[in-house]
């Protein structure tokens, strides 16, 4: 999964004549529409951090790299400045269920770090990956507003998630999950992993029907012990969903 | 609510002839005056962080996004460089009264996180939102000087607001409110929420009649326990109110 | 008080012919000389952080804003890039004497935060403001070297100035003042307040006859408890005083 | 060892006609192929941090400097913007074995910091350096995905690696090594030293067959005490291996 | 002492014809050779932080400022972008000997902060300054590799050098000196002071015959208590000495 944030080079863009801009926007809309068939989504961003956000889902790094390079070849790319990006991989959204899986394996006598354990874990993950994509896409358009932020579990000198006992971590993640469940239906949450791939350990993408819900979700969960004590947050990026069709409007045309 | 800070591209701007600059400034003044009817305010900033600040109040993220895009289409936008911005939503300015509301609901036997509790809270918030806008705007012009800064409640390893007891937080916010009340009449304070939307949890916009009052307010409150121990401050942006009419003067014309 | 730091755009500047550069420098010298009559001072900076520093003293934010805008209209401004700046207001340089004033008011039975207390404090401040300007300016030229840095009193999780007892703060500031007094005559120190106005709580501007004295002052005071334990320092900017007349030489002319 | 990250200046590059781009890419491919014979490797990066990464292995700083300067002379260099870089030297990858060497020397009565001790250490290092290069290169192509990040051992006020007892450090590095061994075959790890040379103390370059393995390695090891408590991580850079031949494709040609 | 780091604007530079580049490089070589007679040294930097480093030693800030301005007037300056710089003053390299001096003064009954004490300290410093320059320069060419980094003594909330007892600081600096002495002959170390002048308290410039020695020195000393517990390091800049004559080669000519 790759989040790409771009700023529009408005001055250069506006210097083009109307016909050229329409042509360039049409080329871009076409490519983005193709990308969007279940694989990418376009957002209009709020504030100076960027004007457009593209969220790509792909099967492999090679495909993500291909998407990046394809965009760079668009004529529109000359009028877009890469502001930032975030690379992560889709994983189990519910920490809780990994813990449950591990418990169930333990009950079956399958020990951690054995081939059987690895295989069982991998199977569950594969199922979830397969299940996630079709479940995810139809839900995005109904939730127009997006907030994306990367985060770490704190590794402080006193409060250190990675030194906390498994039992405590499990309980904290359970409380955290309960707290998040209050927003079921109003918020769709996607947690992706990026340890070793980008600056933080996770990326969190929230989709909501109302801006207030984005804020309420993060604010409410901040009082959970898992967040209050152990979460370190990166920058927040906020946007409104945009059809590639609307790109023309986003770019001040028509 | 969106704060937008811009730097003027003076060199490019000054290369235009006088007539063109007047024309561009007139177009911008017109659009800004329209925006200003209770919805946006213009400030001339002090120091290198920016030359102009626009503060937009809108009903929705879509409207804020629309305001941003409308500004980007102005011819003046070619001479403005987005320096920074801040996105937040208007909320209860007085933490104290939320706490009081919750107590009153508790007395009525309405438990937190029940539909009744949610609804009662939402009603109070809706009332306050409605009451706030008309109350706010007439007061800005009388308080020419602005200081804007985002802030967090600290989540340190030892001092952590989100781990503090509700009772203690209530008492600290009460002291904080009392401390702020000394400046009633001299300072108009607007606290907006941005958890999950932008880098900090709140934005604080102070409007004052005298620059000294801006400093005195923040300095005095820094000794309150809520600030002394639990506040983490972001950058500070300072400005002087400017009529869109004055924009012409701001831009070195006439 | 506004410190403005600029980088010279040497390449663009050197592309002008000699006559044009002389003309532009003469225009700037004229305006700066006017500004300098007790209100602004010009420094040539050391290192990459900037080439020129302007230090403005004005009666109001409007006047500071006016000075900024006047400079932006100079033809020279096309060859200056704003690197950074710092906004602050002149206040009591000696914390010690505020404490003494408050003690004397307490002895007279005037309680803090009463109108009498406010008024007495305001009167002393007004006197000091009035006394400061004429005392200050004649002393700058004799102390050719400048070091400017913003600073905070630490609000750490363990060491927190704003949680320390008034009595301890008073004693620390007394020791700090004594320590600074060793440099009387060699160093002129100006402490201005910026809480709520810019990133730090104070700006410190040191003027010295010898670079070693700038270093010795800050180094010596670093062992005072007030600095050792409670000071957080921002960036340091160092410069050599320059006559507007010399600007021509600074800019590689004549 | 020098990691160089570049962004492609796509707009300028795309303004060239096809024939010129082919010519420039061919010149670059030729030089890179020469460099690649066991000495340099090319990666296509994911995200906004860069488009191309070059990893150079050389015998000396002079040779690395020569490689940098040779690249700067390429016509392609006009279309590459240096984004970042990292300088380090190849050293013992296994802390554990240094410790073992030191123990074995101690058993022989050779005391630390004597010429004999220095010489024995140097000999082992020289052997390892010689052994490393031929062992390393054939393995890279089979592991298409790269993650590079610099890191420090923490020198916190409470948790400080450099104050920990040798015995504890040895045990932690042993656990860390065991933890890493789970990924043998799937991940090739290269730890290079940069204390005194660049911002962090080590550079870690991971080569993997699957992106998930890059993440799993770093995530798993994060629970080791050596990482959980004592590691401070810098930015992460992720890429896909690219043949110089493929450079033409990377650059949107062919 | 001023360290100046520059990036070469390769694209602009390479657009010049060969004859013009030779002419510009010759002008720069001439000026740099003049500067180098015991006063400045030129290094070719490794990595993206810069391409050229100039290290200037001068008698006064005015002379350093003059050197900066003279360089800015070179035609070559149009092709150099100032990347960063560091300002410091030469002082006693051995903390230990200051402590010894102070002890010897104490034995003679000369009390700190008396005129006699100041004068004796100043005399020793003046001697050392005079002795340092001629001793220093002949040694640089033999030690081709440079590492420069600024550093602070930590003023943490728990570990604070400036709150540590004089006796402990003395012992730590003694251990630190002993640790450094292992590298005598292989490394030439120059510690300059910058408290109050630039972002850190000291600048450390290491000159070595082998890159490994630069790393080994800093790594070894990191285990000394003075470094392990009390040192905060800034960025590291690494380079290879370059004759002004070689500048032509550095710039891709000849």
Image (cartoon, coloured by chain):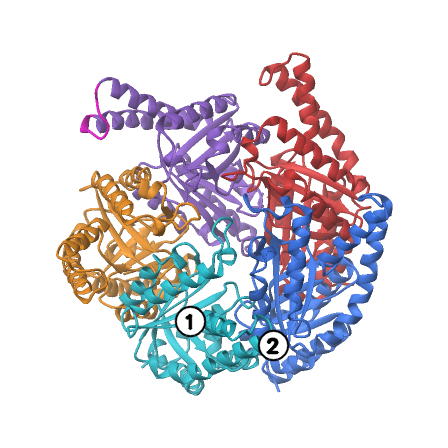
Chain colours: A orange, B purple, C red, D cyan, E blue
Residue B198, image x, y percentages: 38, 45
Tell me which numbered mark, 1 or 2, is placed earlier along the sequence: 1
**How packed is label 2: few (under 14 Cα within 10 Å), some, or many (20 or more)?**
few
User: Magenta includes A246?
Assistant: no
Residue B111 among magenta residues:
yes
**Horizontal relation, residue B170 to residue E173: left or right:** left
Spatial CA span between label 1 and label 2:
23 Å
Residue identifier under label 2: D115
Between E104 and A143, which is closer to the camera in this rendering?
A: E104
Badge 1: residue crowd in 10 Å (few <14, some 14–19, many ≥20) = some
Residue occupying image coordinates x 65% and y 22%: C122
Against B205, is D89 above or below?
Answer: below
Residue A119, position as x, y percentages in the image = 17, 65
The reply to whether callout 1 and callout 2 are in contact (CB within 8 Å) is: no
Residues rendered magenta in the picture:
B109-116
Q: Position of residue A107 (x, y in %)?
A: 14, 54
Residue at 63%, 26% (x, y): give it: C167
Q: Which residue is mark 1?
A: D94
Q: Work out whether residue B232 or residue B191 is closer to the camera in this orientation and state it.
A: B232
Q: Nearer the viewer, mark 1 or mark 2?
A: 2
Task: Tell me the element at label 2.
Answer: helix
Q: Nearer the viewer, residue D44 or C8?
A: D44
Determine if residue C237 is in view: no
């Amino acid at each position: 999964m790759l989040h790409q944030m771009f700023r529009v080079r408005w001055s250069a863009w506006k210097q083009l004549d109307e016909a050229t801009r329409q042509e360039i926007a049409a080329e871009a809309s076409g490519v983005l529409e193709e990308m969007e068939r279940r694989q990418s989504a376009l957002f209009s961003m709020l504030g100076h951090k960027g004007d457009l956000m593209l969220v790509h889902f792909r099967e492999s790094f090679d495909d993500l790299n291909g998407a990046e390079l394809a965009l760079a070849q668009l004529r529109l790319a000359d009028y877009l400045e890469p502001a930032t990006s975030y690379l992560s991989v889709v994983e189990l959204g519910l920490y809780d269920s990994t813990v449950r899986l591990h418990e169930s394996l333990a009950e079956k006598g399958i020990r951690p770090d054995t081939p059987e354990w690895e295989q069982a874990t991998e199977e569950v993950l594969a199922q979830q990956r397969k299940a996630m994509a079709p479940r995810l896409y139809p839900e995005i358009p109904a939730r127009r507003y997006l907030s994306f932020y990367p985060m770490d579990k704190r590794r402080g000198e006193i409060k250190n998630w990675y030194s906390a006992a498994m039992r405590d971590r499990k309980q904290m993640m359970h409380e955290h999950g309960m707290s998040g469940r209050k927003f079921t239906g109003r918020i769709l949450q996607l947690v992706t992993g990026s340890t070793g791939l980008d600056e933080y350990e996770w990326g969190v993408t929230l989709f909501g029907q109302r801006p207030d819900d984005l804020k309420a979700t993060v604010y409410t969960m901040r009082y959970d012990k898992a967040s209050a004590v152990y979460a370190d947050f990166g920058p927040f990026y906020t946007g409104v969903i945009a059809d590639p069709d609307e790109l023309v409007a986003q770019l001040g045309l028509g």
